[in-house]
């Protein structure tokens, strides 16, 4: 039995795993167009934020690597999470915060205040800057709106 060959060109970026807005991942773009029945929002958020992190770690890694097979295997959950986030979105703009521990040299080379870039995965944020502060050395202040 032969495997169908997936012919999307593999995405690669030699500069950073955090990408400028103009980059989009081809495998992710393909799977989000798949029609799926969405799981209940409460279940989706609970599974995503489960403390063992299994779902979060696996899907985040697949999104960062644009891993078609893993994304395809979890398309229902990914699309359910996208829809749950969209349905629970605010009608007004607000700020959220994300802290990361990064190499200072990478920060100097890659990030400038005001730079817009794509985080190619779902990521945890907090509306409380003090809460985010416990998770790294560099604070990303993210302007979110109903269109995000």
Image (spheres, rainbow, N blue to C red):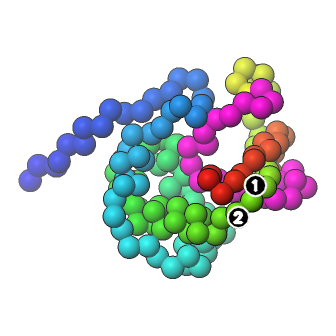
Local crowd size for mark 1, using a 10 Å CA cut-off: few (<14), some (14–19), many (≥20): few
Labels 2 & 1 near each other (Cβ < 8 A): yes
Answer left or right for 35 relative to 20.
Answer: left
Q: Nearer the viewer, residue 95 or 48?
A: 95
For disc 2, the neighbor class at 10 Å (few under 14, some 14 to 19, many from 20) is: some
What residue is shown at x 40% (from left), y 66% (from top)?
A: 76
The magenta segment is 112-134
Quadrant position of residue 140: top right
Residue beneath the point at 71% across and 52% down: 144
- Residue 52 in the magenta stretch? The answer is no
Q: Quadrant of residue 46?
A: bottom right
Q: Position of residue 68 (x, y in %)?
A: 36, 47
Q: Which residue is mark 1?
A: 93
Residue at far left of view:
1
Residue 25 rendering spot, x and y as whole percentages: 45, 39
Q: From the viewer's perspective, is residue 73 above or below residue 5? A: below
Q: Which residue was labeled with disc 2? A: 90
Residue ID at (52%, 61%)? 82
């Amino acid at each position: 039995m032969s495997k169908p060959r997936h012919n999307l060109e593999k995405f690669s970026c030699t500069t950073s795993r955090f990408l400028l807005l103009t980059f989009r991942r081809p495998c992710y773009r393909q799977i989000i167009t798949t029609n799926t029945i969405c799981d209940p929002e409460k279940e989706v958020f609970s599974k995503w934020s489960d403390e063992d992190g299994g779902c979060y770690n696996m899907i985040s890694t697949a999104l960062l690597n644009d891993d078609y097979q893993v994304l395809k295997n979890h398309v229902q959950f990914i699309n359910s999470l996208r829809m749950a986030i969209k349905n629970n979105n605010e009608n007004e703009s607000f700020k959220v915060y994300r802290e990361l521990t990064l190499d200072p040299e990478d920060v100097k080379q890659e990030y400038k205040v005001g730079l817009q870039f794509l985080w190619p995965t779902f990521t945890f944020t907090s509306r409380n800057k003090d809460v985010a502060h416990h998770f790294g050395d560099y604070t990303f202040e993210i302007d979110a709106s109903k269109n995000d």
